[in-house]
Amino acid sequence: MRKFLFQVFFAVVTGLIGAALLHLVIVLALPDFSERDAYTRVLAEGEIHRFYPLGEKPDAAGLSKDDPFVDMAVCAFDVSERPVRLTAANGGVPFWSLAIYDQSSNEMFSINDRTSAGGVLDLVIATPVQLTTLRKALPPVISQSILFETRQAEGYVVLRSLAPQKSFAEIASQFLSGAICAPFEARSRSRF
Amino acid sequence: MFRVPFLIAVALVIAFGGGVWSTILALDATVGFGAIKLGAWEAFPEAQTDKADPYAKSHRANAGKLLYASAEGLTFTANVDETGARLAGGCSYRITGHTPPARFWTLFAAAPGAPAPSIQSDLPTALNSRIILRDKDGNFDIALSASARPGNWLAVPAEGNFRLTLTLLDTPTAGSSGLIDLTMPRIERTGCGNA
C-alpha cells in the first residue's frame, strides 16, 4: 500500500512537471499558431492594400474600435513586389496617428500628425532593395514622403483619428475613408 | 492490475489539465510583465513591441487587439480604487488631479472584457480632455456614478465590477522610463448605494 501511495505521488509530480512544460510550450508557441491575433483579423477584413474602417461592434473579422472617441481603420500590406504608399489628406482632424506592425504584431514604426510633415499622412513602405532603387531617382510625387524601410515584407497598418466631440465625427471618418493604402508604382527610366 | 495505466492516466490528466488551465489563467490574468503602476493605474508601454515578454506576446496574439504604438498613445487601466478595493458599479467615485502630459486623453468605464461604450449613448459614458471642466489650476474632478451628478459626470455600469480606461494620446511618457515620477489622477470612493 505504501508503495502504491509513493507511486501515486510520483505520478502527480510527473504530471506537475509535465504541466509546467506544457504551460511554457503553449505560451511560447501561441503567437505562431494563434488564429485570433491582430494580423489574422486584419487579413480577414478582405483584400489587402485597402483601408477598412472599424465600427463600434466587432465586425466579421472580430475587430472593433477600442475607444469611443477614436475612429480606426486597418490595412494589410505586402511590399515584397512593390512599395506601398499611404496617403491621407488632413481635413482638420485634431489628432491622427498611424502605426505599422509586422506579422507578429510588433510595432515597427509609428507617427502622428505632429511628427509628420505638415500634418499630412504621406508615407512609403519599402524593402531596403526597393528603397535603394527609389532613392537613386526619387520620383517627384514622393519627394515629400516619409520613407520607411522594412525587412518584413508583410504586415498591417492601423490609422486612428480623434473625434473629441460629435461635430468632429464626420471629419474624422472622412479622414479615414479618404486614406489610401496602395502599391506605389515608381516610373522607371526603362520607359524611355 | 490496472495500477500502471491508472498512474499514467493521473500523470497525463494533471499534465494536460494543469498545463492548459494554468496557461489560460495566466493569459487572462494579466497583459504580461513590465507593467508601470501609478497608484491604481497600470500601463504596458512595451506590450506592442518586440521587446515584450513571452507572456505579453502570447496574450496579445490571443486577444487580437490593435494596440497603441509609441507615437500614438499609452493606455492606462484601473480595476481598483486608491485603497485597492475593486471598482464596483453600485458605488460612487471621484477622480481628481491631472494626467501626465499628453495632447489629448480619453476616459471611459466598461465591465472587464466588455467592449468600449458607444458614443451614441445618451449618458456620458466617455469623457475626454476637450469636453471636461477644469478648475483654475487645470485640475479636474470627475464624479463616477451610475446616477447623474453635477459637474463632470462619467456614467458607469449600475451593476458589477468595472474597469477604467484612460488613454493618453501623443504623450511623451509612452516611451519614457521616467513615467514613475509622474502623477496620475486619484480614484477615491465617495460612497456606496444611494450615498
Image: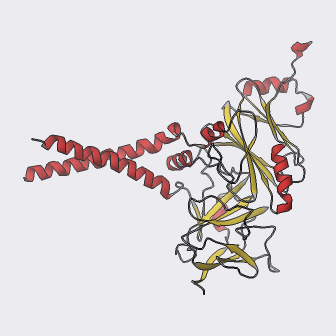
Position of the C terminus of chain A by quadrant: top right
Q: Residue at x 52, y 55 (%)?
A: B33
- Position of A103 relative to B171 (above/below): above
Along the line of sight, the residue nearer the viewer: B115 or B100: B115
Q: Residue at x 58, y 70 (%)?
A: B40
Along the line of sight, the residue nearer the viewer: B195 or A75: B195
Q: Residue at x 47, y 39 (%)?
A: A29
- Position of A72 relative to A82 (above/below): below
Q: Residue at x 74, y 62 (%)?
A: B119
Measured as percent of width and height from the top left, residue B26 is found at: 45, 54
Q: How is the image coloured?
A: secondary structure
Location of residue B140 (image quadrant): bottom right
In this rendering, the count of numbered labels is: 0
Q: Is residue B102 visible?
A: no
Measured as percent of width and height from the top left, residue B29 is found at: 48, 58
Along the line of sight, the residue nearer the viewer: B186 or A88: A88
Q: Is residue B125 left or right of residue B138?
A: left
Q: Residue furthest left?
A: A1
- Position of A32 relative to A171 (above/below): above
Measured as percent of width and height from the top left, residue B73 is found at: 71, 56
Q: Is residue A140 left or right of residue B113?
A: right
- Position of B170 relative to B95 (above/below): above
